[in-house]
Image: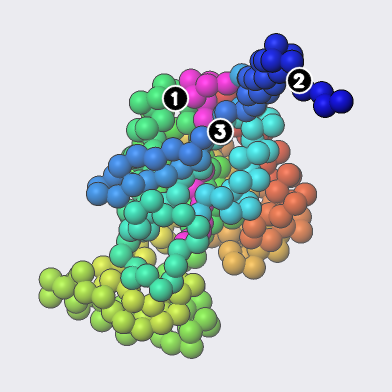
């Protein structure tokens, strides 16, 4: 004999399943992909709220490293660990001149961006947070993102930004920048930089220089103004010690003891730690990306620093 489900019983089951989904949703931690327009481009970021918290309770704005993105392992894992410690975070994607950019930068694309573009985009996200009731903002940046967060804090001095966490910040000084360019590409930086400078002086800064080695992109197509902005002697890229000394908000620098990409952070920041504003901690055995237990320890230090500075 075939059995059929009674309509009333089926309706009850559907209602029960719907209630269960609503119940699960109520306990889910809010996370959201956010976009906003900025100078003809769409910027995107990933918002993760801690349980029971809103932006008014404080938020950490996270900036990724050079040509990276906000869903790479160190950024995503940092957001999860901050959330577990009761801290909400917004991990932004720098556009690097690409509309609604996702993932690592594609080296086949023309490089049409500048170091200082990131400062403006960090500012756009700080404004977005304030427009959405954020009152206390911590800037956290990894690698070049740390240097750009530092530059933003030093130059903009927004009162909503209460502290700064720099994870393996890019601290390469101008002589080292030239040395590393030669080591990576077996070329002198100066002739390439001089060519970019000449183009800018001739009013041709928008010109693309073909087959130009640029950071992690060999043989790239790079706008003259882009190359000049990152590699010139006066670039904000190389002013870390100067900006650290200017800050009047608490700063924590987290350093990996075996950081292969930024091995001179201790040396480059030494002159800035002669007061109570700038603090440093070294994670033993950590390399540039603070993987696994090293990242746990790094975020523990960051969380302790953030909560202590709120007291």
Marks 2 and 3, how far apart at CA: 38 Å
Judged from the image, the secondary structure of the residue bearing numbered disc 2 is loop
What stretch of residues is rendered in magenta?
53-68
| Observer able to see residue 190 | no
Earlier residue among tags 3 and 1: 3
Residue depth check, mark 2 versus mark 3: number of the one nearer the observer: 2
Marks 1 and 2, how far apart at CA: 52 Å
**Residue bearing the label numbered 3:** 31
**Which class describes the residues within 10 Å of circle 2: few (<14), some (14-19), or many (20+)?**
few
Marks 3 and 1, how far apart at CA: 16 Å
Q: Residue at x 12, y 75 (%)?
A: 202
Q: Is residue 296 above or below residue 73?
A: above
Task: Find the residue positioned furthest to the right.
Answer: 1
Q: Residue 8 vs residue 311: left or right?
A: right
Q: How many marks?
A: 3
**Residue bearing the label numbered 1:** 134
Across and down, in percent, residue 227 comes to 33, 71
Task: Find the residue positioned furthest to the left.
Answer: 202
Judged from the image, the secondary structure of the residue bearing numbered disc 3 is strand
Across and down, in percent, residue 81 comes to 68, 38
**Residue bearing the label numbered 2:** 5
Q: Residue at x 49, y 65 (%)?
A: 172
Q: Residue at x 50, y 61 (%)?
A: 104
Q: Is residue 6 above or below residue 277?
A: above
User: For this rendering, which residue is in front, 201 or 8?
Assistant: 8
């Amino acid at each position: 004999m075939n059995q059929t489900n009674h309509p009333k019983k089926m309706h009850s089951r559907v209602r029960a399943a719907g209630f269960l989904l609503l119940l699960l949703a109520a306990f889910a931690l809010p996370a959201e992909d956010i976009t906003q327009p900025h100078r003809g481009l769409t910027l995107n970021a990933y918002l993760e709220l801690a349980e029971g918290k809103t932006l008014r309770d404080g938020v950490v704005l996270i900036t990724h490293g050079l040509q990276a993105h906000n869903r790479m392992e160190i950024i995503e894992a940092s957001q999860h660990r901050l959330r577990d410690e009761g801290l909400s975070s917004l991990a932004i994607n720098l556009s690097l001149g690409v509309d609604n950019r996702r993932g690592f930068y594609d080296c086949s694309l023309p490089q049409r961006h500048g170091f200082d573009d990131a400062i403006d985009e960090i500012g756009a996200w700080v404004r977005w947070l304030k427009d959405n009731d954020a009152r206390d903002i911590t800037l956290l940046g990894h690698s070049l993102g740390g240097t750009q967060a530092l530059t933003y804090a030093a130059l903009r001095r927004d009162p909503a930004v209460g502290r700064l966490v720099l994870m393996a910040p890019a601290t390469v000084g101008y002589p080292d920048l030239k040395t590393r360019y030669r080591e990576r590409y077996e070329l002198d930086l100066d002739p390439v930089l001089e060519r970019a400078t000449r183009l800018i002086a001739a009013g041709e800064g928008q010109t693309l220089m073909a087959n130009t080695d640029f950071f992690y992109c060999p043989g790239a197509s790079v706008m003259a103004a882009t190359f000049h902005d990152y590699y010139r002697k006066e670039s904000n890229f190389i002013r870390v010690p100067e900006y650290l000394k200017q800050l009047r908000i608490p700063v924590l620098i987290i350093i990996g003891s075996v950081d292969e990409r930024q091995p001179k952070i201790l040396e480059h920041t030494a002159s800035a730690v002669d007061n109570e504003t700038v603090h440093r901690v070294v994670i033993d055995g950590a390399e540039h990306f603070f993987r696994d237990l090293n990242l746990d320890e790094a975020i523990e230090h960051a969380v302790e620093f953030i909560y202590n500075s709120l007291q």
